[in-house]
Amino acid sequence: MVTPLTDIQVRNAKPKDQPYKIADGGGLHLAVMPIGSKLWRMKFKQANRKESWATYRTF
């Protein structure tokens, strides 16, 4: 079981040389890009059983 991310953890996530992920549980993670952008990504399965990603950009 993964502990959900807090607002402080999300705000303090700093960019590195390579993109990296911080798990939030249930297929949701925060992706931190080298340029400093942060994306919420959720993995899910479609009705045809193919895996897909939903991505939401933070500001």
Image (cartoon, helix red, strand yellow):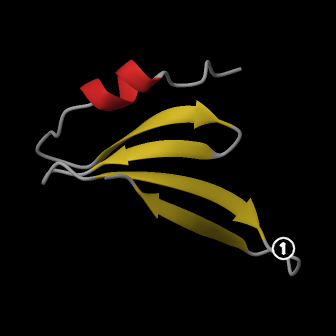
Residue 51 located left or right of residue 7: right
The secondary structure type at the circle numbered 1 is: loop
**Which amino acid does the dot numbered 1 rest on?**
Arg
Toward the bottom, the furthest residue is 48
Residue 46 located left or right of residue 42: right
Point 71% across, 39% down: residue:
26
Report the front residue among 2 and 4. 4
Point 52% across, 43% down: residue:
29
Rendering coords of residue 50 (x, y %) = 75, 75
Rendering coords of residue 8 (x, y %) = 37, 20
Above or below for 26 versus 19 = above
Q: Quadrant of residue 43?
A: bottom right
Q: How many marks?
A: 1
Toward the right, the furthest residue is 47
Report the front residue among 18 and 13. 13
Above or below for 18 versus 6 = below
Above or below for 1 versus 28 = above
Point 31% across, 52% down: residue:
59
Point 86% across, 81% down: residue:
48
The 10 Å Cα crowd at callout 1, few under 14, some 14 to 19, many 20 or more, is: few
Rendering coords of residue 28 (x, y %) = 60, 45
Q: Quadrant of residue 3?
A: top right
Rendering coords of residue 49 (x, y %) = 84, 73
The residue that mark 1 highlights is 49
Q: Quadrant of the N terminus?
A: top right
